[in-house]
Image: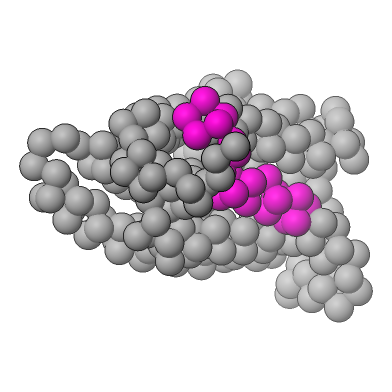
Amino acid sequence: MATAASIPPDINSFSARDRDFHVRMATGLAIFVIFAFGQFALRGLSNPATAPWWVHAHGLLMLGWMGLFIVQTRLGRAQTNKARSMELHRALGWASCLLVAAIAVAGVNAAYRAVELGRVPPFFTQPYFVALTFADIAGFVGVFAAAVALRRHAPWHRRLMLASVILVLEPAFGRLVPLPLLGAAGPWVERACQIAVFAFPLRHDLRTISRVHPATLVGPAVVVAEQAAILALAAFPPFVAHVQAIAAA
């Protein structure tokens, strides 16, 4: 049986099916995120008009990054003026790096502000909420950084970039999963939904290269690691005391 390493680069890296799949996934995930947050607001479960500016800033940064991701996947698929398209793809890639750095800062700030102002969702403890933010940001930034580092290896780059998008779907699933009704099982249901999304790239790999590419397995592994880190950090006494001090400030 062929291994990932033995697949000719011109087939594995530049297959039209591979490019088309990642364009469809990027677009589909963006639509899913917009739907998840939109229906939450339409159901009256949140009021964007009364949300603090830093919540809007974080959301706009995320939307901007996802928009860049979609544009980049489409540029990578371009067949006409390919050299120019790839040049623009790389330029937008560095802009994407700046956005990711801003998202990380804005995310941590939003978590701390939520604790200070008593805006933590009631189905999360304050330490769990902050640990969730830290772990999700660390996983997202880490996989994104790996994708950038492997940008010259298209199969790895594409799959890790897609994984980084799936890794930030937790808030979207949180707007769809009835967390207050699920109790302690809620976070596990969210994580199960995230892992389920990886079934799409897994199926794509099996259909195109007859095996699961190692990069496709990185995302699910990070989801599991994130949840383990959240549980450990939320129960770590010094961390709990740190969050409690923020809440009391």
Q: Name the residue: 51% across, 67% down.
A: 105
Q: Residue at x 56, y 50 (%)?
A: 215
In the image, the segment drawn in magenta is 206-227
Residue 176 falls within the magenta-colored stretch: no
Q: Position of residue 193 (x, y in %)?
A: 70, 32
Observer-nearest residue: 166 or 158?
A: 158
Residue 84: x percent and y percent? Answer: 11, 50
Q: Is residue 60 visible?
A: no
Which secondary structure type mostly characterizes the magenta part of the structure? Answer: helix
162 left or right of 134 in image: left
Seen in the picture, residue 105 relative to 140 is either above or below; the reply is below
Q: Is residue 108 left or right of residue 144?
A: right
Reply yes or no: does residue 223 show up in magenta: yes
Q: How is the image coloured?
A: one colour
Q: Is residue 218 left or right of residue 156?
A: right
Q: Nearer the viewer, residue 108 or 244?
A: 108
Q: Residue at x 72, y 28 (%)?
A: 177
- Observer able to see residue 75: yes
